[in-house]
């Protein structure tokens, strides 16, 4: 079995190393990840300049681009004749749940694989900063072994968030939907040394919807949250309303 | 009525100027857009450095960040006490339809407004390159006048694509769903002058699903395509399958 | 007479516009400047990606690169068959004197022209922020008229700093050497919203050598400081010492 | 003895690792280098955003900035109470000789140390790509041992270029001046996949002045070239001419 690994924290991130070590027991591992931290990159693609792929001393490959670039380049340019069976993105340093998912570069790397027809898992370790990478790595192994025993028929995209606890303390896995947050906190103004106002993006909003079927709830309760994702943003339930609205 | 305008082509883009001129007849216009072309930025947020907001000679404001940064900063930091009634992002130079929507910075700017509770329209002009900005600007006016006559109760997020033809040749508006493409073309390898291999992101795939209810179909037939979007990526139809799969 | 203009503040900077307007009375003006503020860029060259040259509504051209890139691309790629007679870089927003000169992108743009065999002037307006752009623009006209009356035989590189006062208050021009500063102030530590330490580059050191023949002295006294520059960094006076030192 | 090491190829570059290993036998080694390849960065300083300093698994520190930023931050912010006795920048992958010196980030890192009052050596290994890092590392040891035996009284800035041959094949050291090149080759036009023209910075010009006292000559003949540098760009020999010229 061949795995392609990526992330958004950069090719040198401990979470990625832990994942690569764990999965190399189950098959061939190829790593193509960003050359620097690209957290918050979402699905951004680099269109205005070409990309380079280089190999680090660790054997990992790095790209001067986004997580989406990495998977796109790896699948269509670097290993086009022997595509991966599964793409795993992570282990992200921090959770990717609820609304935050749309900003995540880790989820975006998995999404790009899914768009290219390859099954994909985005794997994040809750905790700020997280410490139990071994837990998340073992969850990856569990999921891959499950997948080997019973592959999906088509490509699936799973967003997996793991509580930052020892593996033995996990309560199990829960299939969840994405929760919702209140709107984000405002930007945080500050001054640079020349007295000019600058702004930092602030923290996400507080959790608003953490019902029992959400990823927020599951992780808070000690479960691994497994959320299947799709990429059709159409608001089907509003088609009728908008049709009537346009007709006046 | 107060409008906040943004885009992903940069604050100097002709499409943005055309939009600002058209909407200034209907209310107050504030422009906060990226300082340089950020096409393909998706929902990326700048987390590793602070942002600056500057004012150009045109009166437009520009930010050294992404389209999402621009709207986030404008709404939560620049005009927090008098938020806009409507955010319009565009006029994008080129279409944003089907799967491409997840990569679009123009759609992302509108999405950020929607997440902050503000009604938002992403407006794109098909054509490579597009020429009839006046058409898209007039469509914006039409939609805003419609909105003034009959506001939405909550925030809505509309993705609007306009055929690149004179306004009189438009066949009308159609409410659509996002179409689907085949997977993207592979990266395009090339060499830099030092003989190293570099890769350009290739073009999107050919259209795969352009049924009569899609944005692809509508624009191809001369209609303005109006697609309501949502931001919950949960694949609800797969919750049952994944639950069973995990249980083995 | 044909002028190539550039700067490091970006193609939209008021100082550049003032310079272009003033020199267009004396000949043909071509502007190729960075697409965004690149103050502090020094002689940096972009080697890891290609450059694009675009034309703004103002007729100015902008490049997604450094000041050095701009002049290099303009002279060798954009106007290779009709090279400029003179390159003028500026009007920089702020002085470029003494040790600071080695960090300046404005001086670097002129230096690149000089290395390509073209006479060049770097023009900076002291003042934080500066206000009398008309003064510096008129100094540029004075220097160009002088040059037309009596051209240099080979290429020369002049670093010109103008006091931020009305033209009538200038005391004249002085040929100067670069002064010296004390070493720079330390970096300024701060915290980002996540509690991580960040560092801002601090202000330059206080002036150490502002003898009567220096640019620091001239500008402080109300004179335009004109310093001829060269680009050979060899410390000729130390060749003997280092030779003996190596021999032990 | 305490060493601060930096470079412009990035903290992961084999040349830097070789240098750190060699010098750790002679004293304490602190490494602060750019997080990514910044070749061609010259003396550029990052003024528009703050810098972060992080520690890699190797113990090396990396900064999201230029070589100049790295040395500036290290000396004034990271180790202000125990400044290094000597800064060594390199081992650069490729030569830094003649006119090219003004573009070099490796030389710039050493220059920044020198401006801060600290003795500094820029060390480059000729060869495209270079292979004999052990040779350059041993030259560094030779120079440091020489320096320990006979320290300079004030700060000195040495630009050292090493032929890419086994150490035993070196012919010795030569104190040199910087040679000169013909002007650079033109930019190299190409097309991106959208058919737009792009430009790559071309190679340096051919060597023009490689007299027996130059670095070009020394390295070509198998000698280590040691060039003392200074940072006063004033063209003293032209002060008289420019004075007369201004007087008309």
Image (cartoon, coloured by chain):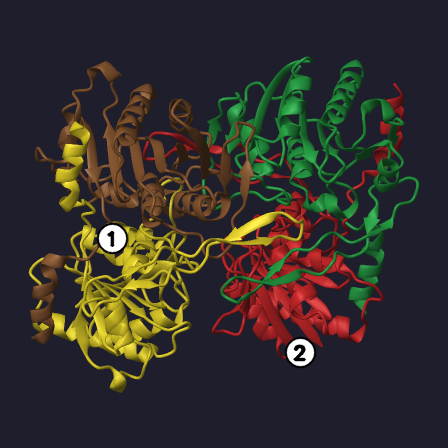
Chain colours: A red, B green, C brown, D yellow
Please tell me in which quadrant of the rendered image residue A118 appears: bottom right
In this view of the protein, which residue sits in the foreground, A126 or B157?
B157
Please tell me in which quadrant of the rendered image residue C31 appears: top left
In this view of the protein, which residue sits in the foreground, B241 or A68?
A68
Q: Secondary structure at mark 2?
A: loop
Label 2 Cα neighbours within 10 Å, binned few <14 / some 14-19 / many ≥20: some
Q: List the residue tagged with mark 2.
A: A26
**Same chain for the residues under marks 1 and 2 in the image:** no
Label 1 Cα neighbours within 10 Å, binned few <14 / some 14-19 / many ≥20: many
Residue A241 visible to the viewer: no
Please tell me in which quadrant of the rendered image residue B113 appears: top right
Q: Position of residue C213 (x, y in %)?
A: 10, 35
Q: Secondary structure at mark 1?
A: helix
Residue B219 visible to the viewer: yes
Q: Residue furthest right?
A: B212
Residue A6 placement, left or right of C63:
right
Q: Residue at x 30, y 36 (%)?
A: C122
Q: Position of residue A109 (x, y in %)?
A: 65, 57
Marks counted in the figure total 2
- Which quadrant does the N terminus of chain A fall into? bottom right
Q: Which mark is residue A39?
A: none
Q: Residue at x 17, y 23 (%)?
A: C172
User: The disc numbered 2 marks a residue on which chain?
Assistant: A
Q: Position of residue A43 (x, y in %)?
A: 65, 49
Compared to residue C219, the image places residue C189 above or below, namely below
Compared to residue A91, the image places residue B222 above or below, namely above
Question: Depth-wise, is mark 1 or mark 2 nearer the camera?
Answer: 1
Q: Which mark is residue D112?
A: 1
Q: Residue at x 51, y 28 (%)?
A: B77
In this view of the protein, which residue sits in the foreground, B106 or D163?
D163
Q: Residue at x 37, y 46 (%)?
A: C198
User: The disc numbered 1 marks a residue on which chain?
Assistant: D
């Amino acid at each position: 079995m061949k795995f392609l690994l990526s992330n958004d924290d950069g090719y040198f991130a401990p979470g990625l190393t832990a994942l690569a070590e764990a999965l190399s027991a189950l098959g061939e591992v190829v790593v193509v990840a960003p050359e620097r931290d690209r957290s918050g990159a979402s699905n951004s693609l680099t269109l205005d300049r070409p990309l380079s792929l280089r190999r680090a001393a660790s054997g990992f490959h790095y790209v001067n681009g986004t997580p989406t670039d990495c998977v796109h380049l790896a699948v269509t340019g670097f290993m086009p004749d022997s595509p991966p069976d599964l793409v795993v993105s992570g282990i992200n340093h921090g959770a990717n749940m609820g609304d935050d998912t749309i900003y995540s570069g880790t989820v975006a790397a998995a999404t790009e694989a899914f768009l290219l027809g390859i099954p994909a898992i985005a794997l994040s370790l809750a905790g700020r900063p997280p410490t139990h990478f071994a837990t998340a790595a073992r969850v990856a192994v569990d999921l891959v072994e499950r997948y080997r025993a019973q592959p999906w028929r088509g490509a699936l995209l799973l967003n997996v968030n793991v509580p930052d606890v020892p593996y033995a303390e996990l309560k199990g896995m829960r299939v969840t939907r994405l929760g919702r947050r209140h709107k984000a906190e405002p930007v945080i103004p500050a001054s640079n040394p020349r007295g000019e106002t600058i702004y930092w993006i602030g923290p996400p909003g507080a959790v608003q919807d953490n019902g029992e079927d959400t990823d927020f709830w599951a992780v808070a309760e000690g479960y691994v949250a497994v959320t299947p994702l799709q990429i059709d943003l159409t608001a089907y339930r509003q088609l009728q309303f908008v049709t009537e609205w346009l007709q006046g």
